[in-house]
Amino acid sequence: MLKPLTHKSGQALVEFAVVFPLIIVLLFGIYEIGIALSVQQTITYAAREGARVGALTNENAQIESAISTATEFIDPDNDRITIQITPENEASRGRGDELTVLIEYDLPLIILNIISENIVLSSQAVARI
């Protein structure tokens, strides 16, 4: 006579094996979103700081230096950061004109070394000289 299947010790292991990869992907996704939000906040601060320094000094070198200082935590070499200052020419900017600083950051997204994508985060700040 056959015994009823009441012993289910392997069931939990199978369920764990099915759910575990999904939990890992979810946790790494949350981690990547946290990194992206932190970088976005940093470049927003850097754009504001660059616009503030530009409004005070009207010099591109000092604007770029302020941005570089504000972003050295996320990119010490500044190889993923693009800075656009409008108007570009210092001589064409006069008192009362608007100075626009746009920063773009190429953020590599790596989820478990399976998917490797880049997303571009950007921030813009405007100040009056």
Image (cartoon, grey):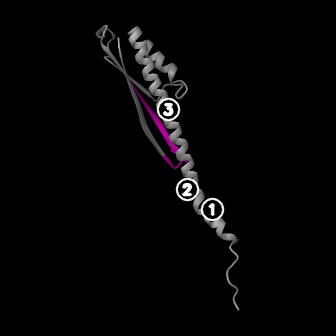
Specify the amino acid type for callout 3. Answer: Val
Q: Dot 2 lies on which element?
A: helix
**What segment carries the magenta color?**
102-115
Residue 71 image point, x, y percent: 50, 24
Specify the amino acid type for callout 2. Answer: Leu
Residue at 53% in and 24% down: 72
Q: Dot 3 lies on which element?
A: helix
- Label 1 close to label 3 by CB (< 8 Å): no
Q: Where is 27 relative to 85, above or below?
A: below
Residue at the far bottom in the pictured view: 1
Identify the residue under disc 3. Answer: 39
- Residue 18 occupies quadrant: bottom right
Gap in Å between the C-alphas at discs 2 and 1? 10 Å
Helix, strand or loop for the magenta stretch, by majority: strand
**In the image, 66: left or right of 21?**
left
Residue 26 image point, x, y percent: 54, 50
Residue 87 in the magenta stretch? The answer is no
Q: Is residue 33 visible?
A: yes
Ranked by sequence position, the earlier of labels 1 and 3 is 1
Q: Is residue 60 visible?
A: no
Identify the residue under disc 1. Answer: 16
Identify the residue under disc 2. Answer: 22
**In the image, 95: left or right of 27?**
left
Residue 17 image point, x, y percent: 61, 62
